[in-house]
Amino acid sequence: MVVPEMVAPGGPSLNAWLIQWCQMRLKTNGSFGLDAVSMGVADEKDNLLCVTVFDNFRKGRNGQALNIECAIAADSPRWANRGTIRAILHYPFCQLKVQRMTLFVAESNARSFKLTQGLGFKVEGMIREALEGGENLHVLGMLREESRRWLGDLLGPKPDQESQPDIAQMPVSNMIAA
């Protein structure tokens, strides 16, 4: 099997088309802002398998990237491989450097709910009667450090390693007590 490839950036028209593809598949009939960014995953025959839309990017008063919301719609489970998951998480955590990512899953979508938890998203709550017919919506989140499982060193050093010197790189003269 050929590993699905990420659809190359194609400007505003491709972004709008991918967002529309995602909206048609979401139970939430998601509406996204004008600054939403999308990425698609296609198979070896250029069949679109999955679209991820990032929206509602928020920064704090000091300019720090705080949160981005994510919606994922798929026609096939074949999109869910390590490379694709890394690419989806790379954008918010490595490029935008957000502290957290939030996504929403309809209560009736048990497969997606289980998948997102398996990816490392934590259940943070429920929005009651948020969807048509009074269906509830799960709220899930992933913190930057929790994405390290997928992104590894792409995130940079672990916070507890930043303040400690690397003994292997330290000259021996610095390690000898006076």
Image (cartoon, rainbow, N blue to C red):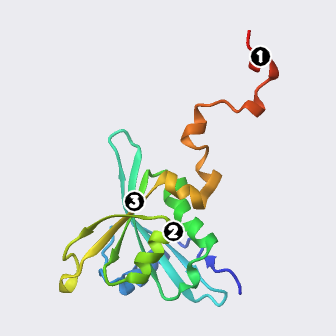
Q: Amino acid at mark 2?
A: Leu
Query: Which residue is at the front of the view, 53 or 164?
Result: 164
- Quarter of the picture containing the N terminus is bottom right
Q: Earlier in the sequence, mark 2 or mark 1?
A: 2
Q: Amino acid at mark 1?
A: Ile
Q: Quadrant of residue 149?
A: bottom right
Q: Residue furthest right?
A: 172
Q: Distance from label 2 to label 3 (Cα)?
A: 17 Å
Query: x, y (%) of residue 11?
Result: 51, 70
Label 3: few (<14), some (14–19) or many (≥20) C-alpha neighbours in 10 Å? many
**Helix, strand or loop at mark 2:** helix
Q: Distance from label 1 to label 3 (Cα)?
A: 47 Å
- Quarter of the picture containing the C terminus is top right
Give the residue at x 56% y 60%: 90
Give the mark toward the camera: 2 or 1.
Answer: 1
Q: Disc number at residue 119?
A: 2
Q: Distance from label 2 to label 1 (Cα)?
A: 45 Å
Q: Quadrant of residue 32?
A: bottom left
Q: Residue furthest top?
A: 178
Q: Cβ–Cβ below 8 Å for labels 2 and 1? A: no
Query: x, y (%) of residue 68?
Result: 39, 59
The reply to whether residue 92 is in sight is: yes
Q: Which residue is mark 1?
A: 176
Q: Which residue is mark 3?
A: 68
Q: Amino acid at mark 3?
A: Ile
